[in-house]
Image: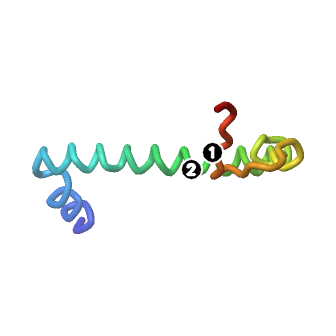
């Protein structure tokens, strides 16, 4: 019973804390889910994405270098 009482007194008793904790939890879940799915996608498609094969097609200028064509 003390766990539910502690949860109630910490998060639910005041509406401002309750709503803030819901928004913060949703934001954290969204960021974590996005990172997790991106890592899963990258591992499934390793070697097939542009970032993995770029060095085969682009020579010379690196990502940080800017090539100016013109006067």
Instruction: Return the mark for residue 64.
Output: none
Provide residue 53's location: percent of width, then percent of height: 84, 46
Q: Is residue 32 above or below residue 50?
A: below
Front one among 2 and 52: 52
Please tell me in which quadrant of the rendered image residue 3 appears. Answer: bottom left
x and y percent of residue 34 in the render?
Answer: 54, 44
From the viewer's perspective, is 34 left or right of 6? right
Q: Which residue is mark 2?
A: 35
| Residue at horizontal 70 percent and vertical 49 percent from the top | 40
* Element under disc 2: helix
Q: Please indicate whether residue 22 sits to the left or right of residue 59 in the image.
A: left
Residue at image point 31% right, 49% down = 24
* Display colour scheme: rainbow
Badge 2, how many Cα within 10 Å: few under 14, some, many 20+?
few
Q: Quick one: 56 or 37, which is closer to the camera? A: 56
Quadrant of image for the C terminus? top right
The residue closer to the viewer here, 58 or 42, is 58
Which corner quadrant of the image does residue 54 belong to? top right
In which quadrant will I find the N terminus? bottom left
Residue 66 lies in quadrant: top right
Question: What residue is pinned by disc 1?
Answer: 37
Residue at far front of view: 71
Q: Nearer the viewer, residue 10 or 50?
A: 50
Mark 2 and 1 residues: CB-CB less than 8 Å, in contact? Answer: yes
Is the residue marked by circle 1 packed among few (<14), some (14-19), or many (20+) residues within 10 Å?
Answer: few
Disc 1 on helix, strand or loop? helix
Q: Is residue 8 left or right of residue 69?
A: left
């Amino acid at each position: 019973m003390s766990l539910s009482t502690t949860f109630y007194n910490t998060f639910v008793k005041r509406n401002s804390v309750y709503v803030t904790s819901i928004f913060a939890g949703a934001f954290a879940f969204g960021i974590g889910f996005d990172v997790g799915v991106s890592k899963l996608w990258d591992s499934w498609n390793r070697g097939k994405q542009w970032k993995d094969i770029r060095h085969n097609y682009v020579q010379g200028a690196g990502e940080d270098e800017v090539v100016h064509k013109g006067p």
